Structure formats: structure tokens, C-alpha cells
Image (tube, grey):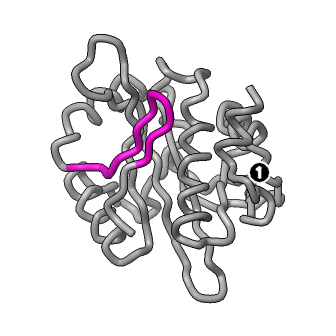
Amino acid sequence: MWPVTLESGDLVLRPIRYRDKNDWTRVRSRNREWLTPWEATNPIPGGQLPTFAGMVRSLNGQARQGTALPFIISERMPGAAAPQLVGQLTVSSIVWGSAMMATLGYWVDSARAGRGIAPTAVAMVTDHCFQVLGLHRMEINIRPENGPSLRVVEKLGFRDEGLRPRYLHINGRWADHRSFALTAEEVPGGLLPRWLSSH
């Protein structure tokens, strides 16, 4: 199941690595204002989020246990020797057994936003989860004010399943989210082909 690399056109989704720290930190620092309103925070008084190494260690441990797929979103660019880091996508809370479902979260460099990277990455991973892993349901939870992310699920045809009040601790407070989902039966031919043929 893991590790796995997924590719579509110039987009490459690959496992996150410790050696991504410098590139990841640089992109995140440049996008601080863009990402902070939507970022998870620790509700425990004085609690901190893990360091980059701690995050990678935790995600890799979850991947080994079959409960997460932590991807770096990278893009082939003219003149670059290797695909460049432009975001992150994590499939988490994978539940097997009678549920066969997972939750998906992502962020993309604001300099690359609006170019179809996020919907393409979500479609790639959703197809992998449905077609290769055999999962049945994918869920994405989005702040109601997060217009760019709402456009991603709208473009891909995820169903709006309603509001989850005070669902996650975001940017220092408990924040409402809208829950969107898609099941395997809704995209029998694959989500990526449907998305690529729609634009």
C-alpha cells in the first residue's frame, strides 16, 4: 500500500520525506498569510503543533499502519531538474472493515493556485483510494469561508453533506466546517478522467 507515487501530466504526488524540510519550510513561510486562516491548531493550552520532523515521523508511522497516505504535491517545471514542491495532500483517518473510508486534506502554494493543481491532485488520490485500495468513501471538510477549497470540491462533484459546527480547531478557535463526500459508485469511470475531460 505504501509508499506509492502517482503521476498525471506534470503533476507528481510522492511520499513526504525528511529531506523535504527546506523546500517545505520555504513554501510554507512564503504562504503564511494564505494558509493561516485554514490551519489546524492545538487546542491544549500551551500546546504546539509538531516540528517538521515530528510531522513526517507521525505521518510515516500512520502510513505504515495503513491509516494515512502523506503526499507531497510536486510539479515538473521548465528548467528544473526535478519536480518542485508546490503543496501537500494527506489522506488520513483511513478506516477499513465495514466503513472503507478516509478523509482528505490539502494545501497548495498560492503562486500555483487557480491552475487546476488541487482538483487534479484530489482526483488522482481519490482514484487511487477507490481503485487500488478498495475504499468506498472519501470525505473533505472545509471551512465555509474557504472559497478556493470550496471551488475544488464543486469542480470535482463532491456532495455537500452539511455543516459540522465547531468541528476542528483552526487558527486558534473551534471552527465550523462543511463536509463533502464522494463514494466509489458515483465515479465508476474514475474521478480523474471525469475532471480532465471537463476543462
* Residue 39 coordinates in the image, percent (x, y): 49, 44
Number of marks drawn: 1
Tell me which residue sits at (34%, 65%) in the image. Answer: 2
Residue occupying the far front of the picture: 189
* Residue hosting label 1: 158
Front-most of residues 168 and 118: 118
* Residue 11 coordinates in the image, percent (x, y): 45, 33
Give the quarter of the figure containing the N terminus: bottom left
| Residue density around tag 1, few if under 14, some if 14–19, many if 20 or more, within 10 Å | some
Badge 1 amino acid? Phe
* Residue 62 coordinates in the image, percent (x, y): 35, 71
Quick check: is 11 in the magenta stretch? Answer: yes
91 relative to 6, above or below: below
Give the quarter of the figure containing the C terminus: top right
What secondary structure do most residues of the magenta stretch adopt? Answer: strand
The quarter holding residue 47 reads bottom left
Name the element at disc 1: loop
* Residue 89 coordinates in the image, percent (x, y): 47, 47
Residue occupying the far left of the picture: 19
Tell me which residue sits at (76%, 59%) in the image. Answer: 188
Tell me which residue sits at (55%, 78%) in the image. Answer: 95
Quick check: is 31 in the magenta stretch? Answer: no
Residue occupying the far bottom of the picture: 97
Q: Which residues are magenta?
A: 6-17
Tell me which residue sits at (50%, 59%) in the image. Answer: 91
The quarter holding residue 152 reads top right
| Side of 81 where 108 appears, left or right | right
123 relative to 112, above or below: below
